[in-house]
Image (spheres, helix red, strand yellow):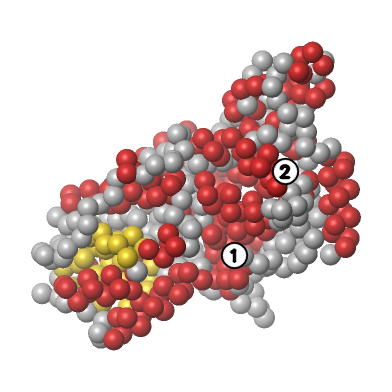
Amino acid sequence: MTVAVVLFTSDLRLHDHPPLRAALKAADEVVPLFVLDSGIRAAGFDAPNRRAFLADCLRDLDTSLRRRGGRLVVRTGPVAREVGAVAAECGAAEVHMAAGVTSYAHHREERLRGRLGESGVALRVHEAVTTVVAPGTVTPSGSDHFAVFTPYFRRWDRKRPRQPLSAPRSVPVPEGVRGRPVPERAEVSGTSPGLPAGGETAGRDRFARWSRAGLSRYADGHDDLAGDATSRLSPYLHFGALSPVELVHRARERGGPGADAFVRQLCWRDFHHQVLAARPEASVRDYRTRHDHWRGEEDAAGDIAAWREGRTGYPVVDAAMRQLRHEGWMHNRARLLTASFLTKTLYVDWRIGARHFLDLLVDGDIVNNQLNWQWVAGTGTDTRPHRVLNPLVQAKRFDPDGAYVRRWVPELGDVDGRAVHEPWRLPEDRREGLGYPAPLIGLADGLARFRHARGRD
């Protein structure tokens, strides 16, 4: 009997899983393996919300495998060591896994290839598993990646993705490969109370329901803060519980402006992946435009704390930050305006905001989180790096009657209509009874500081 190992990483599903399909084709038996990587915890990326969602994903994956006669083998420790040990225990000739683009993923693959090579075990790395198009597939002439989204999208949109694969009917697993119990969400403390359920089953159900009711409205409604018309699929995409290839195909089958807008957002994921694959240092350093005068933790401690706590005095910013803490998720438009407020109105280093988001976001993703923060901060791929999102303009446009603010800032729950966005304009006796802070800084003052600081860079 021949055996292959499938190492699951950010691809926790059975539908449209090229490494699993390849392993089943190459061997009589397959070991589905997930390693709880000690390096992830050491790197500070093991946040409670993602750990809890991961537990859901692993349990769902194990359940789905058991329905097909298999099971998920879970090990703990350094990935190269544990994969090498499993391959030795079952006599595997090959290990299959999905490609990654981060520096951590590259180093993991190098260590794994070296460890397996010592034992004569082949490592097969599969592209376009966590993205629609593999990084490096779509490139401009004279460069290894696109630095601007729109020309990338034009080329990407003309390239047809591969056909998605169905889930296998049977996954035969050899006897005797040891593993630890699959983790459970209940074992994780410190999670956000509104954290959604993880796993492929939950993700496929969410997409099915949203595509029937929300996809057609997505083009016009995805920026509506109170309407919450976004798909909320980002956590499932981050963990690979859903295939972006399959989502593109299914959206295009339905067609219409909503489907086109949704596919464009999936392209943004691929765009960021190809940027970071070519420039892995962009996860920690300015990608394009360097700025040396950011305020840091020491200079802006009070402002940073108020921003994290949702106490800036700008209701739409505070509502978004409180949504993040409660749900481990934030509306995309809210991510843009809170990031702009921190980096441009308060002129705080984007890395401080990116770190806070990674501490709480269930979809916290080095690729998309860091590069989106850089886009907003004006150090990344935005072709208008000096744009500033005015929180009052954003609030009146995307939360016109204040429903989003009242949902998340209960102190302002009795303030009607648009007045909720400018509580400092209320009569003094009414304002004092709210228990809501005054603005940290005037918007004109923040803009003047931003322009002055950028002039020095």
- Viewer-nearest of labels 2 and 1? 2
Numbered circle sitting on residue 186: none
Tag 2's secondary structure? helix
Q: Which residue is mark 2?
A: 303
Asked whether 431 or 247 is in front, the reply is 431
The x, y position of residue 395, in whole percent, is 72, 33
Residue 229 lies left or right of residue 115; in this view the side is right
Residue found 20% across the figure and 67% down from its top: 30
Q: Residue at (67%, 58%) from the top-left corner?
A: 374
**Is 218 rendered above or below residue 237?**
above
Q: Nearer the viewer, residue 218 or 116?
A: 116
Instruction: Give coordinates of residue 195: x percent, y percent.
Output: 44, 38
Identify the amino acid type marked 1. Ser
Residues packed near mark 1 inside 10 Å, few (<14), some (14 to 19) or many (20 plus): many
Q: Quadrant of residue 167?
A: bottom left
Is residue 338 something that shows in the picture?
no
Disc 1 marks which residue? 283
- Where, quadrant-wise, is the N terminus in this rendering? bottom left
| Residue sitting at x 64%, y 69% | 146
